[in-house]
Image (cartoon, rainbow, N blue to C red):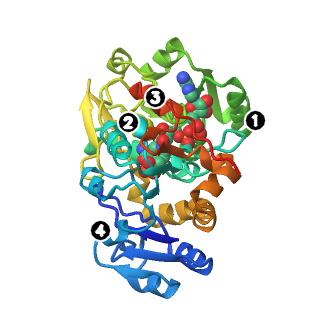
Amino acid sequence: MTIGVPKEIKNNENRVALTPAGVEALVAAGHKVFIQKTAGEGSGFTNNSYEKAGATLVDTAAEAWSNEMVMKVKEPIESEFQYFRSDLILFTYLHLAAEPKLTDALLASKVTAIAYETIQLPNGALPLLTPMSEVAGRMSVQVGASYLEKPNGGKGVLLSGVPGVRRAKVTIIGGGVAGTNAAKIAIGLGADVTIIDNNLDRLRQLDDIFGYQISTLASNSSNIAQAVKNSDLVIGAVLIPGAKSPKLVTEAMIATMEPGSVIVDIAIDQGGMFETADHATTHDNPVYVKHNVLHYSVGNMPGAVPNTSTIALTNATLGYALQIANKGYYKAFSDNPALLKGLNTFNGSVAYKAVADVYKYPFVEPVFNN
Ligand SMILES: NC(=O)C1=CN([C@@H]2O[C@H](COP(=O)(O)OP(=O)(O)OC[C@H]3O[C@@H](n4cnc5c(N)ncnc54)[C@H](O)[C@@H]3O)[C@@H](O)[C@H]2O)C=CC1
Ligand SMILES: CC(=O)C(=O)O
């Protein structure tokens, strides 16, 4: 199979879909990989390192997009829709529940679009979302701590406090991968951490992992309202796979927070879970203020640490890319139900139920028999 890797063009997106090591594995399996020149530079990978790994460098995005499968990091933006075609396999993050124009463009051009974030193992794990949720979860506390500083607009609170002065209160809503990684860092920095989740078994696991270093609360609007009101930093990390995030934190709740408090809406890529965080921001201009509360809602947080993120992403995607390239998508889907869960659009139809439900489009269940 021929595989193209265009340079990412979203604001401050410095990740790339394959490391040179990933290229080497695909080339060793007999595939041809075409990397757009400088695509890896932001992540610390030179053109030369890709050539050494066996890739062919191409000058333009159009050349990278002209291959049988295109691997990307971020969901395509409008200027990339021109490259869609019916015989294209697109393998990337898509977040279609929050991307109506992209959904329509993929359907109109009949692209076989496989979303990293909805590939799902039988135990419910999302193996291609996990590494970026680990990164975003860890980053959320770093950025939250930074925006709590007075020169950055915050209330001037140090997460750990000092002897004689209270620690900052950090509430994490959604105790999955991103939430757990946020908790690790927040605990490490000495904050007073509460995790809210609607899955009581998950809260039991978190209690076993962190013991008395955290408080846990069942997710309901009364607990969320109380915790939000008393928090210095609130991190949103809820997910219902493929679906739009539920707006669990209302504007009225945000209005009860002290001025200079901070929210970090990690879940913004699925539409966001704070009523007041109504749009994704960029690394150029990551924060805005509503009700005197700083809102950080960057949709590609891992793009700020591209070296770490690109390696972590390729670690997770490569095995699936090899399955698609070695077998062709039909056999790869029929052999691996986890990969099939990643299929979001196929032959002009929505192939993922939660996405079809958002837009009230017909859901056509994909069937690939051996
Ligand atoms: N902004 C960014 O750059 C990035 C965003 N993300 C996003 O972060 C979000 C979280 O991802 P993961 O941690 O991997 O998901 P996950 O599936 O591991 O965890 C989600 C958690 O939310 C909980 N949950 C669901 N409904 C809830 C409710 N009503 N109340 C409380 N908890 C509820 C689930 O029980 C689960 O524990 C996703 O939207 C993901 O796309 C991930 C990486 C980067
Ligand atoms: C998960 C995702 O969309 C990202 O890492 O940017």
- Gap between marks 2 and 1, in whole Å? 34 Å
Q: Where is residue 25 in the image (x, y as percent from the top left)?
A: 60, 76
Amino acid type indicated by mark 2 = Ala
Q: Is residue 343 left or right of residue 90?
A: right
Q: Name the residue under label 3.
A: 362
The answer to whether one can see residue 243 in this image is no
Of 224 and 333, nearer the camera is 333
Of 13 and 206, nearer the camera is 13
Sequence-wise first label, 1 or 4: 4
Q: Name the residue under label 1.
A: 208
Of 88 and 9, nearer the camera is 88
Q: Mark 2 points at which residue?
A: 98
- Gap between marks 1 and 4, in whole Å? 51 Å
- Gap between marks 4 and 2, in whole Å? 26 Å
Task: Nearest to the eye among marks 1 and 4: give it.
Answer: 4
Q: Which mark is residue 62?
A: 4
- Gap between marks 3 and 1, in whole Å? 43 Å
Element class at badge 3: loop
**Would the CB of label 3 be found within 8 Å of ligand 1?**
no
Q: What crowding class fits label 1: few (fewer than 14 Cα within 10 Å), some (14-19), or many (20 or more)?
A: few
Q: Do the residues labelled 4 and 3 touch (CB within 8 Å)?
A: no
Amino acid type indicated by mark 4 = Ala
The answer to whether one can see residue 130 in this image is yes
Q: Are marks 3 and 1 in contact (CB under 8 Å)?
A: no
Q: Which residue is drawn at 50% across and 48% down?
A: 115
For residue 324, what is the image quadrant?
bottom right
